[in-house]
Amino acid sequence: MSATASTLNFTMTGLSRGITYYFKVTAWNIIGESASSVESYILAATVPIAVVQPVISVQTSTTITITWTEPDNGGSAVDDY
């Protein structure tokens, strides 16, 4: 993980998916450091990718069974299908 900062922005790379990152910002000069900002946070994750085409594995006049492979969850567990 690495970070760079400039006058008004901050970039962090190498985040780990599924981890929540918290940030506060302070300013400082030769006299000292300010109080910190309100905390911001982000969950390093994305929405799951699309499920690959489901397969109908059993079909009768009254029943159907559909199966699929779990997709990449984007860093956060899938809650429901």
Image: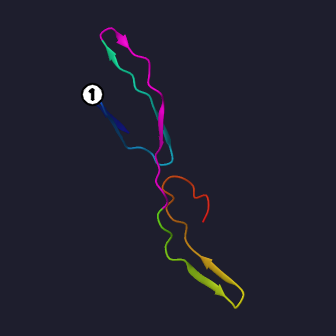
Determine the residue located farthest toward the top in the rendered image: 31
Quadrant location, the C terminus: bottom right
Q: Is residue 65 left or right of residue 50?
A: right
Is the residue 17 above or below the residue 31 in the image?
below
Q: How many marks?
A: 1
Is the residue 20 above or below the residue 25 in the image?
below
* Residue depicted at 46% across the width and 46% down the height: 44
* Residue depicted at 49% across the width and 61% down the height: 72
Q: Secondary structure at mark 1?
A: loop
Residue 32 among magenta residues:
yes
Determine the residue located farthest toward the right in the rendered image: 62
- Residue 12 figure quarter: top left
Which residue does the numbered mark 1 point to in the structure image? 7
* Residue depicted at 70% across the width and 91% down the height: 61
* Residue depicted at 62% across the width and 62% down the height: 80
Q: Is residue 60 left or right of residue 12?
A: right
Chosen colour scheme:
rainbow
- Residue 70 figure quarter: bottom right
Residue 43 spot, x, y in % from top left: 49, 44
Quadrant location, the N terminus: top left
Q: Which residues are magenta?
A: 30-48
Q: Main secondary structure of the magenta part?
A: loop
Determine the residue located farthest toward the front in the rendered image: 38
Q: Is residue 53 left or right of residue 60?
A: left
| Disc 1 residue type (three-letter) | Thr
Is the residue 74 above or below the residue 29 in the image?
below
